[in-house]
Image (spheres, rainbow, N blue to C red):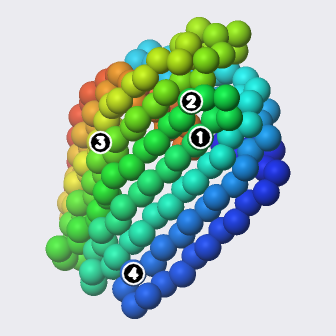
Amino acid sequence: SITDPAWGARATGKFGDTGYTVLVAHDDGGGSVIIPGPYSSSFANQDFESTVAIGRVRHNIGKSFVSFLGTDREIEGGGYNRVYGPDFQWRPNDHETVTGQLLFSNTETPNRPDLAAEWDGRKMNSHAGEIRYGHNDRNWDWFTLYRDYGDGFRADNGFVPQVGYRENYVEGGRT
């Protein structure tokens, strides 16, 4: 989502079982921003400058991990989008995996109704969560996924094309 970087810096590293990455950039603007909804998405021109920061810390525990993600986009002239929260993957054995993420977003849209009707300086706070369970062995495999995206969730530094819904999906098979 950084469409025209004027400058940027990235740092990555690892200390034992803990790794991190941080990216900071100044975006001169251009390109499009996704404005998600429950049934469809729309796009708006990103006709403004902003400063972007993205970071993640991940700690490995055997075949599993826990981590924390944070993103921030500060829009020149007013507005911001901040997303943060934990995620994990737990592998209790070679056949099962549980993966989850819970994110929170705090947003103040830019006061640019000329670019998008929603961009009138409004403030929104919401959540997004996913949890997945999968099992796979020689004869059986099954998978379930639950998602819950609040109406006001925004991830301007990522790709979230739909909000305002809940869903559960299950599939299975035998070999």
Q: Which label sits on residue 74? A: 1
Extreme-left residue of the structure: 92
Q: Are marks 1 and 4 in contact (CB under 8 Å)?
A: no
Find residue 96 and report its horizontal and vertical position in percent.
21, 66
Residue at which label 3 appears = 129
Secondary structure of residue under mark 2: loop
Residue at which label 2 appears = 79
Q: Name which residue lies at 37% across and 86% down.
A: 17
Mark nearest the camera among 2 and 4 is 2
Q: Which label sits on residue 18? A: 4
Q: Earlier in the sequence, mark 3 or mark 1?
A: 1
In the displayed structure image, the side of residue 56 where residue 35 appears, left or right: right
Q: Are marks 3 and 1 in contact (CB under 8 Å)?
A: no
Number of residues whose C-alpha sits closer than 10 Å to that of mark 1, classed few (under 14), some (14–19) or many (20 or more):
some
Q: Earlier in the sequence, mark 2 or mark 3?
A: 2
Secondary structure of residue under mark 3: strand
Number of residues whose C-alpha sits closer than 10 Å to that of mark 3, classed few (under 14), some (14–19) or many (20 or more):
some
Residue type at mark 1: give it.
Glu
Measured in 3D between alpha carbons, the distance from the residue under mark 2 to the one under mark 3, in whole angstroms, is: 24 Å
Measured in 3D between alpha carbons, the distance from the residue under mark 1 to the one under mark 4, in whole angstroms, is: 28 Å
Mark nearest the camera among 2 and 3 is 2
How many marks overall?
A: 4
Measured in 3D between alpha carbons, the distance from the residue under mark 2 to the one under mark 1, in whole angstroms, is: 6 Å
Find residue 88 and report its horizontal and vertical position in percent.
29, 62
Find residue 91 and report its horizontal and vertical position in percent.
23, 71
55 or 102, nearer to the observer: 55
130 or 51, nearer to the observer: 51
Measured in 3D between alpha carbons, the distance from the residue under mark 3 to the one under mark 4, in whole angstroms, is: 24 Å
Measured in 3D between alpha carbons, the distance from the residue under mark 3 to the one under mark 1, in whole angstroms, is: 24 Å
Measured in 3D between alpha carbons, the distance from the residue under mark 2 to the one under mark 4, in whole angstroms, is: 33 Å
